């Protein structure tokens, strides 16, 4: 039970942030009466992120090396994703995103404390550690882009059906979201490119057993993101086309990395 105390507390704090964001987004009375609270929310969010980071790095560190289990990897990815979102939200009104992102972070923050799956700690050299960190940063940047794509699809559907809601009015203009989307895709693609290059250089067999499918799916995702950026620049692709390509490409990344770790650590190691 002691091992669940701090992760559980972190998850509760994330859920509280999600609740506060929902109040800011959907409740007009809260919007009018809580300007001081809204100024404190970024600071409170930073404190929760710092606590999550302290817990996550504690789970990652092991006397025999780095414990990159599925649950630890998900927690680290969620941590970086929320950190990127927090930095972006300082200049953009993105309360609606918190309603979805914070509960996901709460779920990932408590996962390492649960008896789920297993992975052997590994000793990593500097280059290999850089490859892993670049991969996680790329996934996090593209995760934020994909979340924006989902919100863009929802806003577009609401506009097409001429529906209005308090949630819709609280979100940034669709054009602003689209600009952010392509910025995140561009930066995420650059980091993903660096990750793939470092993998080809420093990994002994990037197409070896247990790694080939991850490599192939990552390359396919890289190709789709590249096509999307080129199509946007030269052909003016936007709207539904951009959203669909972004979501398909990110799904390939999730299946390639998270899906493969889930199969190796949980499905194949579970007792028959």
Image (cartoon, helix red, strand yellow):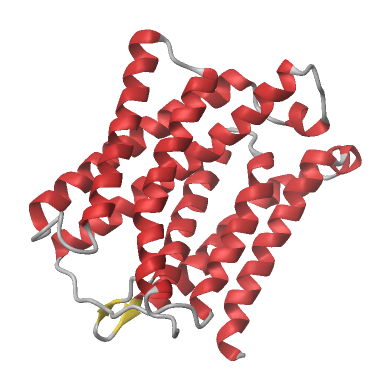
- Please identify the quarter of the rendering in which residue 94 is found: top right
Is residue 184 placed above or below 3 in the rendered structure? above
Q: Position of residue 242 (x, y in %)?
A: 47, 24
Q: Position of residue 85 (x, y in %)?
A: 52, 45
The N terminus is located in which quarter?
Answer: bottom right
Of the pair 132 and 70, the residue shown nearer to us = 70
Tell me if I can see residue 192 in this picture: yes
| Lateral position of residue 240 relative to residue 201, left or right | right
| Lateral position of residue 217 relative to residue 174, left or right | left
Q: Position of residue 17 (x, y in %)?
A: 69, 56
Q: Which residue is the extreme one toward the right? A: 29
Q: Which residue is the extreme one toward the top? A: 235
- Please identify the quarter of the rendering in which residue 169 is found: top right
Q: Which residue is the extreme one toward the front? A: 272
Q: How many marks?
A: 0
| Lateral position of residue 171 relative to residue 239, left or right | right
- Please identify the quarter of the rendering in which residue 229 is found: top left
Q: Position of residue 102 (x, y in %)?
A: 62, 55
Tell me if I can see residue 47 in this picture: no
Q: Residue at image x 14%, y 68%?
A: 125
Q: Residue at image x 15%, y 45%?
A: 197
Is residue 16 placed above or below 91 in the rendered structure? below
Q: Residue at image x 29%, y 80%?
A: 120
Is residue 255 placed above or below 185 in the rendered structure? below
Q: Residue at image x 37%, y 9%?
A: 235
Q: Which residue is the extreme one toward the bottom? A: 1
The C terminus is located in which quarter?
Answer: bottom left
């Amino acid at each position: 039970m002691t091992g669940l105390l701090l992760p559980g507390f972190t998850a509760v704090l994330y859920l509280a942030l999600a609740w506060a964001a929902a109040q800011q987004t959907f409740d007009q009375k809260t919007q009018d009466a809580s300007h001081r609270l809204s100024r404190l929310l970024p600071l409170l969010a930073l404190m929760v992120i710092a606590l999550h980071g302290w817990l996550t790095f504690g789970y990652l560190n092991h006397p025999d090396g780095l414990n990159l289990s599925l649950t630890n990897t998900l927690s680290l990815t969620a941590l970086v994703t929320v950190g990127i979102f927090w930095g972006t939200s300082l200049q953009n009104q993105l309360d609606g995103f918190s309603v979805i992102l914070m509960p996901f972070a709460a779920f990932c923050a408590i996962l390492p404390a649960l008896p789920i799956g297993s992975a052997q700690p590994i000793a990593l050299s500097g280059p290999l550690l850089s490859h892993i960190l670049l991969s996680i940063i790329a996934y996090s940047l593209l995760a934020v882009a994909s979340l924006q794509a989902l919100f863009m699809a929802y806003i577009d559907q609401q506009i097409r059906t001429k529906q209005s809601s308090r949630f819709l009015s609280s979100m940034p203009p669709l054009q602003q979201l689209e600009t952010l989307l392509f910025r995140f895709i561009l930066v995420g693609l650059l980091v993903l490119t660096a990750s793939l290059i470092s993998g080809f250089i420093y990994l002994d067999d990037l197409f070896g057993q247990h790694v080939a499918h991850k490599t192939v799916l990552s390359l396919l995702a890289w190709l789709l993101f590249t096509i999307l950026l080129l199509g946007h620049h030269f052909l003016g692709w936007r709207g539904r086309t951009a959203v669909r390509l972004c979501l398909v490409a990110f799904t390939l990344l999730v299946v390639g990395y998270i899906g493969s770790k889930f199969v190796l650590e949980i499905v194949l190691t579970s007792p028959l």
